Amino acid sequence: MTKRAPKLPPPTQQDREAAAIAVEALTAALADPTMMGQRSVAFLDFSNPRRGECHITWANLPGFFQVNDRYSHACLPGWEYTKAEIAAEMIPDLQALAVHAVRPCLPTKGEAAPDLFGVMS
């Protein structure tokens, strides 16, 4: 049996404004990767079981982060995207939140898209 994610409260005006800023920042980073700003990397080492995670954030992309090979945004809690899904799924989800106050409710399509963020690796 799959556990359902907790239902989030309706988006506030502050959530919508943060999503609008995120759309602008990510769109600018797609057009010019130098707009991402300084990259910060943290490695977390878990001793039991033996595994680790690599967390990456960028100075000019507030709320946007990478954990290993998955990307997330603070405005979209519980949702993860692949590198190829950033342009195809994450930005439209953020735009829907900013413009229509609608959070994503369907999983990403998982379709391959051009690797627009090749500089992020």
Image (cartoon, helix red, strand yellow):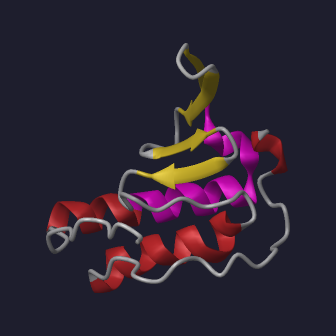
- Numbered range of the magenta stretch: 21-37
| Residue 29 within the segment the image draws in magenta | yes
* Front residue of this view, candidates 11 and 23: 11
| Residue 44 within the segment the image draws in magenta | no
**Quarter occupied by residue 89:** bottom right
Residue sitting at the far front = 1
Image vertical order of residue 5 relative to residue 99, above or below: above
* Front residue of this view, candidates 57 and 28: 57
Q: Position of residue 22 (x, y in %)?
A: 45, 58
Q: Viewed as shown, does residue 43 lie left or right of 20?
A: right
* Front residue of this view, candidates 54 and 116: 54
Q: Position of residue 38 (x, y in %)?
A: 62, 27
The residue at 47%/75% (across/down) is 93
The residue at 77%/53% (across/down) is 117
Residue 59 appears in the picture as rendered? yes
Residue 38 appears in the picture as rendered? no
Q: Quadrant of the N terminus?
A: bottom left
Q: Quadrant of the C terminus?
A: top right
Q: How many marks?
A: 0
* Front residue of this view, candidates 91 and 51: 51
> For the stretch drawn in magenta, what is the main secondary structure?
helix
Q: Position of residue 59 (x, y in %)?
A: 52, 32
The residue at 57%/30% (across/down) is 55
**Quarter occupied by residue 78:** bottom left
Image vertical order of residue 30 relative to residue 105, above or below: above
The residue at 20%/71% (across/down) is 11
Image vertical order of residue 50 relative to residue 99, above or below: above
